[in-house]
Amino acid sequence: MSKKLFILLVVLMSLSLIGIIFVQSFFINNSLENEEKNFTLSVTRALSFVSRDIQDYEIRKFYGLIQPYIANNKEPDSTAIRQLYITTEDEVNNRTIIHRNTILEERFKVPSLFFEIDTDSIDISNFTSERTTDYFDSATLDGNLAIKPTKTLVEFSNLSEIDKKAYEDSFKTLLREVPIYKRVTALQVETLLRRQLSDEGIELDFEFAIYDDDLATKVQTRNFNKGNAYYGIPIFLDTNNESNYKLWVDFPNRKRFLLSSILKMIVLSIVFTGIIIIAYSSAIYQLIRQRQISQIKSDFINNMTHEFKTPIATINLALDAIRNPKIIEDRDKVMRYLGMIKDENKRMHAQVENVLRISKLEKNELNISKERLKLHDLIEDAVTHIELIVEDRKGYVKTHLNAAKSSVLANESHFTNVIVNILDNAVKYSDDKPKIDLYTENIGNNIILKIADQGNGMSKQVAKRVFEKFYREHTGNVHNVKGHGLGLAYVKRIVEDHQGHISVESEKGKGSTFIIKLPLIS
């Protein structure tokens, strides 16, 4: 995959993920706003019903108080009668129509104590209406009207609906000056509010207060705070549907209640968005990892090709020399060339074995039998493998075996290879004379092996990845150091298989120190 295509793919995936998160956030925010609107509508409707119920209760209460004083069987304190006569001539039917409306006014004195006003009593009038219509024939013997009407209609009415409205308006006017705490109690308001809110499906704690314009009244809950009040509606409307009183309600846990209504949706959105983010991150990581592996494998193939070119070329030259008639008769030269062919063959075989060994380790197919061994003996044996090379380059390898105990459970062949690999790297990555020191010490129930060199060293970034398979520090197209990035990966796997730990400390231009920690056995 080309770099441009890779970047384009990452950008498109990132934009898609951001878009999904944005849409989810917009959807959740929109749902929350809808819940807020529905909540406001429900509370407003409940407050309207409470305002109506408070006023209706007050009117019923005072109507009930005065009812005994204006009952039908109660003797009024005074009465008055008013009559209205209307006479019309019906020429078509040759008759006279006389309509009479008699209104009886009964006055009752009611104690003013009911209304909390200063006068001793107030007068309340009850009106009763009697409507009579007489029909007389116009034809008479002596020119006068007939004495008896031919038809009489009589209607009685106490004007109940009109009275009710009149009483209601009168109560509103009389009670307007009564203190609010004498008209309604906090318990009544709370009871009505709780019932109406419950009917609207709102089971939530609330605080409330009745304000006279901007002044607080005694009708309120203890923890009410006007600054947090969210909903208000007028109560005790007068005959003009106006009022100085307003009922305010606050819900301290309103936001939590609204969030709880869409909590399941929020949780599911977060879960699925999280899954998408994890899948996206994993996909990006795998893409980057695959790109790195592709690059590393490409470098590995180049290095392996370089590693095999030299021995193959040497073998071809040796075979060509042996075929020479002058050389084939010289036994010493033939044996020398055959030795070169054998050595180069071993070298290629070792490279292949190293690759196969790493593959088996990854598949857990490499059976490593362990036995009790002295780590110091393994170190001495490993040093002998590189002594001649170090001496040939005028360098040195010194051992400082200070550990009192060195018995470990290890595989002799594999762990010797571990030490040899590290020593071989110390030689290869030293441009000048190789200078190598090996130290051992006991810390607790462990033995520590440090292999320090004064070679080229490496940067911190390289040191973090030096144990990765196929990894080698990029040096352009220069192959002055042989290898394929498998040696230290093999070392790490073997050390871990021995329940040990390996790390490296290095500084560019000053050398490296590899530290191996292994558990001791008694």
Image: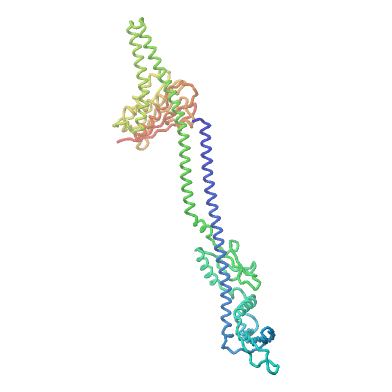
From the viewer's side, name the closer residue of 386 and 195: 195
In this figure, what is the number of numbered marks? 0
Relative height, residue 485 to residue 217 (above, below): above
Q: Is residue 384 visible?
A: no
Nearest to the observer: residue 332 or residue 26 = 26
Colour mapping: rainbow
Q: Position of residue 267 (x, y in %)?
A: 47, 51
Q: Can residue 45 be seen by looking at this rendering?
A: yes
Tell me residue 51's x, y (percent): 58, 70
Between 69 and 450, the one nearer to me in the picture:
69
Q: Relative to 125, is 315 on the left or the right?
A: left
| Residue farthest to the bottom, as pictured | 142
In the displayed structure, 423 sits above or below 181; it is: above
Q: Classify 275 as above or below 110.
A: above
Q: Is residue 35 depicted above or below 63 in this figure?
A: above
Q: Position of residue 220 (x, y in %)?
A: 57, 69
Query: What residue is at 62 percent from the left and 75 percent from the top?
Result: 179
Q: Based on the displayed image, in which of its 4 quarters is residue 326 positioned? A: top left
- In the rendered image, residue 204, in percent from the top left (x then y), is placed at 51, 63
Residue 49 falls in image quadrant: bottom right
Most extreme residue toward the right, as rendered?
A: 143
Q: Quadrant of the C terminus?
A: top left
Please state if 450 lies on the left or on the right of 253 as rendered.
left
